[in-house]
């Protein structure tokens, strides 16, 4: 019970370790995925800074012509041959936005700004690309009121109208003020607001004039056009292939780590299980060794008791014979004496079988011819064969094997006795040996009633017998002799009736 609890405790620790490794790898994979997305977002900011720098270099007095700006954007999207454009080849599209989130100038695939709330969030992740909206730094000047004069993208040249050109930007006129020293009125031909060097007034009013091709627009239309074409943001669509590659590569790495952790946990669990089984097996072996030692001691004691019991039995048998041979003995006493002799013989036979069964098997291998050994055993059992008129056939085949001659003789004797007891009067027994290359097979066949299938394994156990006069130790002794030689024995049915006891793997001597 304690060992079982320990095993379950170790298995629980291994499972907890595996779960910790799995959770760690999931967290690391999520971190790598977030880092790849962050890098792509930073990339969009770098692109926005690059575009801002290019626009700052192209603008003149706060304006950029569209027909000069769009080729630059297309160059960024397509990659081109320039060194500064080469790293941007995974760009999908670039869109310059006004304050209302409408497109001012673009290049590449169109972007649908109506999907979800991209203008509020500033970012939208799709399956194949990510759209990021960044502010652009175009160096716009601050006015006195705190507002900015953004860069304006003017449309390309096209004849819009034939109306005469009239400037839309005028300096504010103010009443002339008297000179504090002379008291004279100042000139009203000069503007009262001085301009800066960058072309802007001190109050932030733009100094660029209306292009000649827009002379047909009135001031309201021109101001609306400027508000619509002013750049306030930059939308960049970048392919997410780099993120997918990074995520896939990291996923393979995390999967490999989890796989190695699983193999390690499974290997450690298997090793612990094997160690537990080995420990349990060692405990069983120690107990079995103790029990075996005890059984050996009991076996020696029983063998000694059986040996000492034969001496009183021999005395009882001798006295019973003396009484039965007296001439003046009553017939009833003579009959009782014969019954004593029969019972004493039965007990003596059982003691002899028990002593043979409990005797240690010390195999002394020599070259033994099967033919002479079989003939000797047959001569020993000649009286029993003649008494039941049994026909015996011997087919030794001239085979010589390596075996202990005494144990082989005892094995054949017990097998033939078992066959003689099994067959009826006038039965038939066959002893056949057959050589198969370096091994031989020996069979003892009879035409008796045979052995039931459920008894063919039990018949070799001690004290199991199907005969009235059997001791149940004959076939047990046979199996001990067979196992001591390294052979195999099995009980098979004989056709059409009877039983076959087959000994296999007898080593043949050339």
Image (cartoon, rainbow, N blue to C red):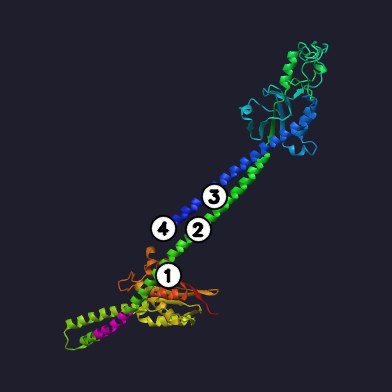
Disc 4 to disc 1, C-alpha distance: 47 Å
Quadrant location of the N terminus in the rendered image: bottom left
Residue 103: x, y in percent? 71, 24
Q: Is 240 rendered above or below residue 470?
A: above
The answer to whether marks 1 and 2 mark residues whose Cβ atoms lie closer than 8 Å is: no
Magenta-colored segment: predominant secondary structure: helix
Residue placed most toward the observer, 417 or 247: 247
- Indicate the secondary structure of the residue bearing disc 4: helix
Q: Is residue 185 found left or right of 327 in the rendered image? A: right
- Indicate the secondary structure of the residue bearing disc 2: helix
Disc 4 to disc 3, C-alpha distance: 26 Å
Residue 262: x, y in percent? 54, 52
- What numbered label is drawn on residue 4? 4
Disc 1 to disc 2, C-alpha distance: 46 Å
Residue placed most toward the observer, 300 or 113: 113
Q: Residue at the bottom extreme?
A: 327
The reply to whether residue 145 is visible in this rendering is yes
Q: State which tag comes first along the sequence, 4 or 1.
A: 4
Mark 2 crowd level (few <14, some 14–19, many ≥20, 10 Å Cα): few
Mark 4 crowd level (few <14, some 14–19, many ≥20, 10 Å Cα): few
Disc 4 to disc 2, C-alpha distance: 15 Å
Q: Quadrant of residue 204?
A: top right
Disc 2 to disc 3, C-alpha distance: 19 Å
Residue 436: x, y in percent? 53, 73
Which residue is under mark 2?
Answer: 270
The reply to whether residue 423 is visible in this rendering is no
Magenta highlight range = 302-317
Quadrant location of the C terminus in the rendered image: bottom right
- Indicate the secondary structure of the residue bearing disc 1: strand
Which residue is under mark 3?
Answer: 21
- What numbered label is drawn on residue 500? 1
């Amino acid at each position: 019970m304690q060992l079982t609890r320990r095993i379950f405790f170790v298995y629980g620790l291994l499972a907890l370790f595996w779960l910790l490794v799995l959770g760690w790898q999931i967290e690391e994979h999520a971190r790598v995925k977030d880092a790849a997305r962050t890098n792509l977002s930073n990339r969009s900011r770098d692109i926005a800074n690059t575009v801002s720098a290019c626009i700052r270099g192209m603008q003149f007095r706060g304006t950029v012509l569209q027909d000069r700006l769009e080729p630059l954007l297309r160059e960024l999207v397509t990659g081109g041959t320039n060194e500064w454009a080469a790293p941007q080849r995974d760009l999908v599209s670039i869109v310059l936005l006004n304050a209302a989130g409408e497109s001012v100038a673009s290049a590449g695939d169109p972007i649908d700004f109506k999907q979800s709330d991209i203008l509020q969030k500033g970012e939208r992740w799709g399956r194949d690309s990510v759209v990021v909206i960044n502010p652009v730094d175009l160096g716009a000047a601050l006015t006195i009121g705190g507002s900015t004069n953004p860069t304006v993208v003017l449309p390309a040249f096209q004849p819009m109208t034939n109306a005469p050109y009239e400037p839309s930007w005028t300096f504010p006129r103010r009443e002339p003020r008297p000179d504090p020293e002379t008291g004279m009125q100042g000139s009203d031909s000069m503007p009262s607001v001085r301009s800066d060097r960058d072309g802007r007034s001190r109050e932030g009013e733009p100094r660029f004039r209306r292009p000649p091709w827009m002379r047909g627009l009135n001031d309201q239309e021109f101001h609306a056009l400027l508000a619509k074409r002013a750049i306030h943001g930059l939308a960049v669509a970048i392919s997410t292939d780099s993120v997918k590659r990074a995520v896939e590569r990291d996923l393979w790495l995390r999967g490999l780590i989890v796989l190695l952790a699983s193999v390690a946990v499974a290997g450690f669990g298997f090793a612990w299980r094997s160690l537990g089984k080995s420990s349990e097996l060692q405990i069983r072996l120690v107990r079995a060794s103790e029990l075996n030692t005890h059984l050996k001691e009991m076996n020696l004691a029983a063998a000694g008791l059986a040996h000492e019991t034969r001496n009183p039995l021999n005395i009882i048998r001798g006295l019973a014979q003396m009484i039965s041979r007296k001439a003046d003995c009553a017939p009833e006493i003579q009959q009782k004496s014969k019954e004593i002799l029969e019972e004493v013989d039965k007990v003596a036979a059982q003691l002899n079988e028990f002593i043979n069964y409990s005797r240690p098997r010390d195999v002394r291998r020599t070259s033994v011819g099967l033919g002479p050994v079989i003939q000797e055993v047959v001569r020993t059992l000649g009286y029993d064969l003649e008494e039941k008129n049994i026909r015996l056939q011997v087919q030794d085949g001239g085979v010589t094997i390596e075996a202990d001659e005494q144990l082989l003789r005892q094995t054949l004797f017990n097998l033939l006795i078992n066959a003689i007891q099994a067959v009826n009067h006038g039965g038939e027994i066959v002893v056949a040996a057959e050589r198969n290359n370096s091994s031989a097979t020996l069979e003892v066949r009879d035409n008796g009633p045979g052995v039931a299938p459920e008894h063919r394994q039990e018949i070799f156990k001690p004290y199991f017998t199907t005969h009235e006069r059997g001791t149940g130790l004959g076939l047990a002794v046979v199996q001990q002799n067979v196992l001591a030689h390294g052979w195999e024995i099995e009980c098979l049915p004989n056709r059409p009736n009877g039983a076959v006891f087959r000994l296999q793997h007898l080593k043949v001597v050339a």
